[in-house]
Structures are given as C-alpha cells and as structure tokens.
Amino acid sequence: MLELFLRIERFTSRIALVAAVLMLIVSVTLGFYQVLTRFVFDAPSTWSEVMSRSAMIWCVFLGAAASFRGGYMMAVEVIYKLVPVRALVWLELLVALCCLLVLGILVYFGTLMTIRVSAQMLSGMQISIAWVYAAIPVGAAFSVLAVLARIASQVTRREPIGPAEAEALPERKHDTPVAPASQAPRHDTPPINAKTSSAPAPTGLTGRSRS
C-alpha cells in the first residue's frame, strides 16, 4: 500500500513540477511580449500583463509541491544540530504536522475563495478570475501529498532524515583537504654544492697540459 501511494505521489509531483515550468515559461514570454508592445510598438497589450501574473501564481503554488517533496524549503539548521539523532524523526513529524496544518487551511479556504469569486472576470479578458484563485487549493493539495510521502519515506528509512544536504551541510562542500606534512609536495630548491656543480668552467681559466 505504501509503495502504491509513493508511486502515485511521485507521478503527481512530477506533473506539478512540469506544469510549474510551463507556467514559468508562459509568464516570462508574456512579460517580454508586454514590454515589446508597450515600448517598441507603442500599443500596450491589455491582456498579457494579467495573464503573465496569473501564470506566475500557478508556477509558485505548483512548484511548492516539488520543494516540499525534495526537502528544499528553508530549515532552521541549528535545531537539527541540537536535537539528538534518535529524536530527528520526531522533529520531522512535528515539521510535517505544521506543514499539513497550513496546507489544509490553504486547501479549505482557497476552495471557498475560488467559489466566491467565480462570477468575477479578469480585467481585459472574458475569463473567470476563479481560474487564478484555483492555484491555491490545487497547489496546496499537491503539496499535501508531497509532505505525506516525504515523512512516510523518512519514517520507513527509505530516505535520510533531516533537511536537504545542500542546505544542512553547506560548509562541508567547500572544505579543502589538507595533506599531512609528510605527504605534502616539496617545492624547495636543493642547495647547490660547489664541488659537485656541473657548470662549465670559464674558458680563460681552463688549464692546458704542456708536452
């Protein structure tokens, strides 16, 4: 049962991530189009700015699911260093519970807000503004699945417990190992011995044998 749930969550999180990337592309493209129409063609578009902002809202809420699943949210690293290793799983459970509480509120009230504004239209477009507000409950629902899958994988030892390694141990990636003194390369120049020097003697001082 757990394997099936993790497989479903992996599929939904991938869909959310792909959709977030597409929304980011749409937002950037429409923003560039808005600049062209306003400053180049001197005919500002009435709909591109609204659509660009709406696409960015969807990008943020959909991308949150992938961030929750990978553990890339901001973490108070000093707490993880102070808590004993055996108690880290309880700390992760507490964090997951707080996240689920906030995400549940977003799902509930986001759904109510989406229904309430369904009669309003986007400025400059004949599209209901509810399509924009729907990003709140939809993205929060994807994030709920991601949080549940992450904590389940940590409890069952399928994944390491704690924040992402890139955030938890940033200083270890920049440490340069120092070789011991006995293994360190020697760059000092050996002293020149006058007796064994192979430098050629001056031509004028070279002795000649007489017959």
Image: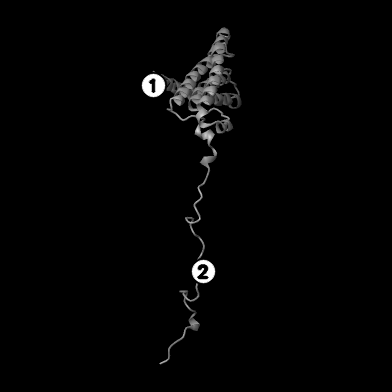
Residue 112: x %, y % from top left: 56, 9
Query: As shown in the figure, which amino acid type bears the numbered disc 2?
Result: Pro
Q: Which residue is drawn at 51% across and 34% down?
A: 166
Residue 63: x %, y % from top left: 51, 24
Q: Which residue is label 1 attached to?
A: 3
Relative to residue 51, is residue 184 depicted above or below? below
Closest to the observer, 86 or 7: 86
Closest to the observer, 45 or 116: 116
Query: For the residue carrying disc 1, how many other residues have a C-alpha within 10 Å: few (<14), some (14-19), or many (20+)?
Result: few
Residue 106: x %, y % from top left: 56, 15
**Disc marking residue 191:** 2
Q: Earlier in the sequence, mark 2 or mark 1?
A: 1
Locate the N terminus and report the quarter of the image it occupies: top left
Residue 169: x %, y % from top left: 53, 36
Q: Which residue lies furthest to the bottom in this view?
A: 211
Closest to the observer, 177 or 94: 94
Q: What element carries label 2?
A: loop
**Disc marking residue 69:** none
Locate the C terminus and report the quarter of the image it occupies: bottom left
